[in-house]
Image (cartoon, rainbow, N blue to C red):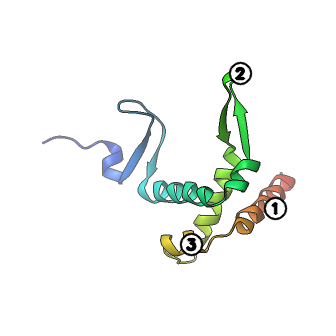
Amino acid sequence: MARKAKSEEQGTTPISLGDDETFGEVVDQDTAQRLSLAFDTLEKFPDFVRRHRRFVGGATATAIISSTAIILAYRTIHGRLAKGESAVDALKGITEDEVERSISLLRRIRRRK
């Protein structure tokens, strides 16, 4: 009998860069769904993304979104799902202001350290 990989036994999926390359921690299905919803949230607010993007690479600069923006979107969508909202309702109801307010929480956490 073929032995299952540890990630298959736990119902988790490794993050993949391409066909053969994987890296980092194994992400469970729930986290993967919430990360996907966080990126869907960011797509709803292009002005928010514009304010939180950075450019890397000199003359051939590539715009990337700040990891802080991704964390804020993840935290906001996670909070709604934790309260029992469906993924569709959470994504429909989320506002840019709600995501922005998460910044104040991060600042309070930093001050405590």
Horizontal and vertical percent for residue 45? 66, 59
Is residue 111 depicted above or below 81 in this figure? above
Cβ atoms at labels 2 and 1 below 8 Å apart: no
Helix, strand or loop status at disc 3:
helix
Q: Amino acid at mark 3?
A: Lys
* Marked residue nearer the N-terminal end (2 or 3): 2
Disc with the residue nearer the chain's start (3 vs 1): 3
At horizontal 53% and vertical 54% (from top left) the residue drawn is: 35
**Relative to residue 8, is residue 99 drawn left or right?**
right
Identify the disc placed on residue 112: none
Say what amino acid the circle numbered 1 marks: Ser
**Which residue in the rendered view is the most extreme toward the right?**
111
Within 10 angstroms of label 1, few (less than 14), some, or many (20 or more) residues? few
Q: Which residue is mark 2?
A: 59
Q: Helix, strand or loop at disc 1?
A: helix
Q: Which residue is mark 1?
A: 104
Q: Residue at x 31, y 48 (%)?
A: 8
Disc on res. 92:
3
**Distance from label 2 to label 1 (Cα)?**
34 Å
Percent position of residue 23, x then y: 47, 34
Indicate the amino acid at tag 2. Ala
Camera-near label (3 vs 1) is 3
Helix, strand, or loop for circle 2? helix
